[in-house]
Image (cartoon, rainbow, N blue to C red):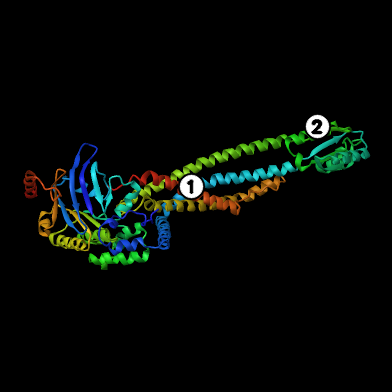
Amino acid sequence: MIEFQQVSKRYDDDHTALRQINFSLDRGEMAFLTGHSGAGKSTLLKLIMLMERPSAGHVIVGGQLLNKMPRRQVPYIRRHVGVVFQNHHLLFDRTVFDNVAMPLEVMGTPSRDIGRRVRAALDKVGLLTKERMNPMQLSGGEQQRVGIARAVVNKPPVLLADEPTGNLDPALSADIMQLFQQFSQVGVTVLIASHDIALINDMNRRTLVLDNGRLMRGGDLPAAGQKQEREQEVLRGQ
Amino acid sequence: MVNKPAKAPRPGTRRAGPAPARGAKRSKAPLRELLDSYFSHHRKVAKDSARRLWQAPVASLMTWTVMGVALALPVGLLLLLTSLQGVSAGWESAARVTVYLEDQLSLEDAGRLRLDIGMRGDVSEVELIDKSAALEEFRTSSGLSEALDYLDENPLPHTLLATPSEGSRTEAGMQTLVEALEQTRGVAQVQVDLGWLQRLNAITELLGRGVWALAALLAVAVILVIGNTIRLAIESRRDEILVAKLVGGTDAFVRRPFLYTGLWFGLGGGIVAFVLLQLTLWFLSEPVERLAALYRSNFSLSGLAFEGTVALIAAAVLFGWLGAWLAVKRHLDAIEPG
């Protein structure tokens, strides 16, 4: 479902964010992406949601090569990639319902379907009773769950999450992870960027470890011995 | 175009094994349903944009007024100009050639001459004013009746008033007619005063061009004002634009609310312009009528006809939309997640 082949990303100022990344995630697979801050986690996610383009290599999502995707096709790709942001990106000028409905509105979903599907998504994250509230009135954990409902409301085959538990206490974080697990069980490919090592260890899932733009573990090519060592260092350091 | 999921590349379709029902269901959505939802989205966005303007009534009213004044000014001047042209056209058609006959010509000869001139193709009507009738008229209109009593004989000649026919009411046509009449035996003098008409025509033409130039400048100003207002609206809805783009909103989808906002600004501005014009007309109509009466003219300021009103409002809507489009083109594409 997601495939990176020799992907590198250099920014204009000669800063190399990613170096020759290789990995692939199957349908229904759930994986974590970790590494110190600045290791390239966000850049990797941005490549999948077409907020950035790779400098070299191939990024393939759902069989589509994203490298040369023309600009006007980008929205149609994004409709198949649900994204949960650390800072939610919720809009406070409208209700929870209207926030969650946005991905359906941009797709031109008929309004009677919108109601049904938004409520299904809100039910899934346990916020059905709060659909008429403003997101501002909700707690941090609830806001994050609204963000998740919005990411999955149009049932995308790929779900990305950037530090989804960043501001939450362990119990809430576990709840959120439980949700992600449920999505992967119904066939959604889930990739979660996080530096919460304890949580990642609890989940016992495939983990991609980035260090200075290199993929140290979890990729498709067997990692070299010295890389293993460095990676242990990284994990201990956090 | 937003609603073309059927054409959109769907990452889900290439995977092995049976596709889940959701993807298939979406691609099977009949065209009618897509169109319905497309138009219902347009309706929704149009309503939402109007509601936003309504919720900030003072700001909206100010924009509408700026636009209304800028539109009413050139349209008002154009109306005035059209009224003036109507006047000069009326006078032009009434332009008559005065032919003074020689003193010693008898009334019978004058009558014959009248018939002769009346036969000409470029003359539609000839009226004979004999010298006694002319004196009588002069006596009553000048108020010099007592002084005239001292005169031994009537100093006025017989006069013919020739009305040029429709086709010869041009400068060249008049020239030919005047020359021909001057050559006629028994004619002492031919008088036609076209100079002031030509001057009036030249002035109205100059004014006309000036008004159009002014209208063009004000149209540009209106477009820029709307563009700037829309730019501010874009800035204040930056988060919303970002989210819409992140969840797969196309450029057209993101632009739509702002284009509708421009359209509503235009419509409101057009209506304000119409109201201002009607008020000004009402305010001016009485003094204009009095002035016209003093000049014995049936001149009156004409308001906008139905077609004119429709054209004014359509132009206003177009300017609003155009301003919004410029702002959207310039500022919206610059907002990209990342």
What's the residue type where badge 1 is placed? Phe
Would you say B274 lies left or right of A103 here? right
Rendered residue at 54%/39% (across/down): B213
A59 or A103: which is nearer to us? A59
| Residue indicated by mark 1 | B319
Query: What residue sits 65% from the left and 43% below the top?
Result: B84
Q: What percent of the width, then of the height, locates residue A201? A: 10, 57
Q: Residues within 10 Å of mark 2 (few under 14, many from 20)?
A: few
Q: Which mark is residue A156?
A: none
Residue B179: image tag: 2
Question: In which image quadrant can residue A81 be found?
Answer: bottom left
Which quarter of the figure is the N terminus of chain A placed in? bottom left
Which residue is more in the foreground, A31 or B324? Answer: A31
Query: Label 1 is found on which chain of the structure?
Result: B
Classify mark 2: helix, strand or loop: helix
The amino acid type of the residue labelled 2 equals Glu
How many other residues sit within 10 Å of disc 1, few (<14), some (14-19) or many (≥20)? many
> Residue B24 at x, y = what percent?
32, 62
Q: Secondary structure at mark 1?
A: helix
Looking at the picture, how far across and down is residue B155, in whole percent?
A: 88, 35
Chain holding disc 2: B
Q: Quick check: marks 2 and 1 in contact, CB under 8 Å?
A: no
Residue B78: x percent and y percent?
59, 44
